[in-house]
Amino acid sequence: MPAKKHTAKPREVHVYVGTRKGGFRFRSDLKRKRWQIDGPFFSSWEVTQLARDPHTGHLWAALHSAWWGRDLQVSRNGGKKWEKSAAGLEFPQERGWNLARIWRVVPSNDGKTLWCGVDPGALFRSADGGKNWQEVTALSQHPTRERWNPGAAGLMVHTIIPDPDAPRTIYIGISAAGCFRSDDDGASWTPLNKGVRADFLPNKFADVGHCLHSMVMAPSRALFQQNHCGVYRSADRGETWTDISRGLPSRFGFAIAANPQEDNTVYVIPSIDPEHRYTCDRRLGVYRSANGGKSWQLLTRGLPQKNVFTQVLRHGAASDTCDPAGVYFGTTSGELYGSANGGNSWELVQANLPGISCVYTAVI
């Protein structure tokens, strides 16, 4: 008989934070009461992603600078040494496109493929661990592309979700185009925005042109998105979307996170409106739905409730896989908050960071 494979029990929770001036790693034991900070990594760069590949343990850092442009770096030893990983991350010169920013690197569920989402609204893939990248031209040359438009942060593929139950299926979120799905490993793409509002378009229920801000998949396999024009749920692989914004103080917001221990629990942090872009009612509050968006509960214990003028960006909230799940979010004013009990109460993990762009987690 073959020897049994022993898997080490998780011992630490890591929270990776990207800011406008560098990336940070926060480490704690599974109780998540005390945190150690490492960093900053890349202190002169804006970090739009700092995340760990669960298959390899590699750290990926997507970087942007107004002076030096964009870069993608990988560390194979926990952040001690970093290497450039950008071969092929470019467009043919004759097309006249500029790769303005790298937003996400996400591994496939089997760990064999890496996907990279960029501005301007394109996707790259790597089959060799990020040594070389190839453009997914079926998305770049999609027939609807002339109706895609940049949002305030550009035209970007910012969300990438491989389907755990279908190895060749992948969902992406584009601002401003909407949700797309490929069932053939990226060879073709279908826009999936039925039921989603786009109040800024002449046709408010167009097939493309939607400003999807962020999207997650729950353990139930339902998809949830925070859109420019509401919060939505899909129980049929994105084919149709149900508006679940009722009970929230605003339809507008950026971040959304799912609880990996509960089938239909999600968290959003609404902003007052597209013009003002700070939290509602001048207080910091997280809204949780434990029933797929049928109702919402405001969570404020441990959060400031007076004179709050900050917001949480599209990648600024995440959850860990502990039980109970930890939930974390970072603000544009540089505060990182965490909850070790699914959001029932919150603690300030770290203040006085640069403005936070993204939050990711790993339990290792």
Image (spheres, helix red, strand yellow):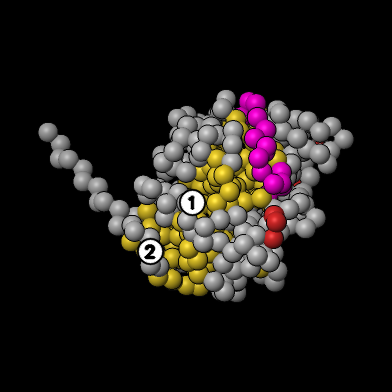
Q: Quadrant of the N terminus?
A: top left
Residue at x 70% of width, y 28% of height: 194
SS under mark 1? loop
- Residue nearer the viewer, 31 or 136: 31
Residue at x 76% of width, y 51% of height: 273
- Is 239 within the magenta? yes
- Is 336 within the magenta? no
Question: What residue type is disc 2 on?
Answer: Lys
- Residue nearer the viewer, 295 or 204: 295
In the image as oriented, which residue stretches furthest toward the left?
1
Residue 12 position in % (x across, y down): 34, 59
Looking at the rendering, the stretch of residues picked out in magenta corresponds to 238-253
Residue at x 74% of width, y 41% of height: 229
Q: Is residue 141 visible?
A: no
Residue at x 54% of width, y 71% of height: 351
SS under mark 2? loop
Left or right: residue 289 compared with residue 55: right
Count neighbours of disc 1 (C-alpha within 10 A) and say few if under 14, some if 14 to 19, many if 20 or more: many
Residue that badge 2 annotates:
33
Distance from the alpha carbon under mark 1 to that under mark 2: 14 Å
Count neighbours of disc 2 (C-alpha within 10 A) and say few if under 14, some if 14 to 19, many if 20 or more: few
Question: What residue type is disc 1 on?
Answer: Gly
Residue 11 position in % (x across, y down): 30, 57
The answer to whether 301 is drawn above or below residue 235 in the figure is below
Residue 332 position in % (x across, y down): 64, 64
Indicate which disc residue 343 carries: 1
Q: Is residue 235 visible?
A: yes
